[in-house]
Amino acid sequence: MDNQQEIFPIVDEDGKVTGSATRGECHSGSKLLHPVVHLHVFNSRGDIYLQRRPEWKDIQPGKWDTAVGGHIDFGETPEEALLREVREELGITDFTPKFVDKYVFESKRERELVYVHRTIYDGEISPSAEELDGGRFWSMQEIHEAMGKNLLTPNFESEFKRCFKPMNILILSGSPRKGGNTDLLVEAFVKGASQKHHVEVVSVHDYKVNPCLGCNACFMSKDSACAQKDDMSIIYEKMSQANMLVIASPVYFYGISAQLKAIIDRFHNPIRDSFHIQKMALLLVGAASLPELFDAILTEYRLCLNFFNIEDVGKVLVRRVKDKGDIKNTDALNEAYKLGCSI
């Protein structure tokens, strides 16, 4: 059974320690805010691992819960607690966690400051026989079918909806060559991301977009209408519905393709203030092997992230792929697929 005399830190909503209390006091309905760590474990197919809580647990016995969840000990950092809990509960030591969110969870019995992380892991999992009643991977369909049926903990259900709700992902693909290496990389990313999200691809070979004229007519128009009448109006509408943007391009003279650059330059328009892009990813393909091949594009990418306060969720940068299909001889397609699954 859980040790009711175990000492937990008491914190404010920023995570600053303000005192301490026993486990029993924290779970007595006192609503003393105490910190916990959660790790959501996905495999490369996009399934999510859940642990089953033992019947002897004092909270939510017998229900399926987040892969790893545990209290932060007094004097311990969230990072230290996460590594310890993952090792103790699942026997995993070689994983790369990514911070997702921090929020306050409140039930009738307790109040927690939750540090949420996620990871992609395809290795062996050995759930602790002492702390857990086993565990397994669940498909997204299984998760959605189990929601609200008293099978999953309320904490997991609310956190899953909060942190992993489906997004509208728009991919701007800049290769004018149909079926080329950039298109193949995009297809691999879509295969992974579409398991949980709605994904749409805008390829430059399917849209006619002229370069920006710099006339500033859009700044003087009530509806930010561009003076040019081309397919950019369609892309503006798609951008207005997107939560995440992916830039994909071949490298031409250390930059993105001219066709994709034309689209990006047309975002010099006040209509961009109505967009809701929160995350971005970058997929690049180049024929050369130079270490600095992607430097100029990466600099522009970082500047845009910082200016618009957008989160970078990952990059796949591929060198030495020149002819159609060369990318199939690399691990890049698998990398893009895994990146898509991780979103």
Image (cartoon, rainbow, N blue to C red):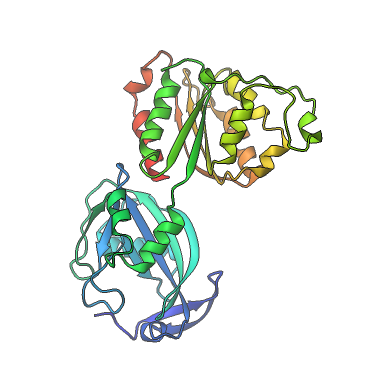
State which quadrant residue 12 falls in.
bottom right
Work out whether 192 lies above or below 311: above
- In depth, the one of 210 and 331 nearer the eye is 210
The number of callouts visible is 0
| Relative image position of residue 258 (x, y in whole percent) | 61, 19
- Residue 165 x, y percent position in the rendering: 44, 52
Q: Position of residue 242 (x, y in %)?
A: 54, 41
In the rendered image, the vertical position of residue 295 relative to residue 6, given as above or below: above
Front-lying residue, 143 or 326: 143
Q: What residue is shown at x 58% (from left), y 37% (from top)? A: 239
Residue nearest the observer in this picture, 180 or 155:
155
Furthest-top residue in this view: 323
Q: Quadrant of the N terminus?
A: bottom left
Q: Is residue 103 left or right of residue 266?
A: left
257 displayed left or right of 317: right
In the rendered image, residue 21, in percent from the top left (x then y), is placed at: 43, 84
Query: Is residue 255 shown to the viewer in this render?
Result: no
User: With 331 as the anchor, is 230 left or right in this view?
Assistant: right
Q: Nearer the viewer, residue 220 or 256?
A: 220
Q: Residue at x 62, y 42 (%)?
A: 275
- Indicate whether 317 appears above or below 4: above
16 w.r.t. 171: above or below:
below
Quarter of the picture containing the C terminus is top left
Residue furthest to the right in view is: 220
Residue at image location 72% in from the left, 28% down from the top: 226
Query: Can you see residue 322?
Result: yes
Q: Is residue 241 left or right of residue 161?
A: right
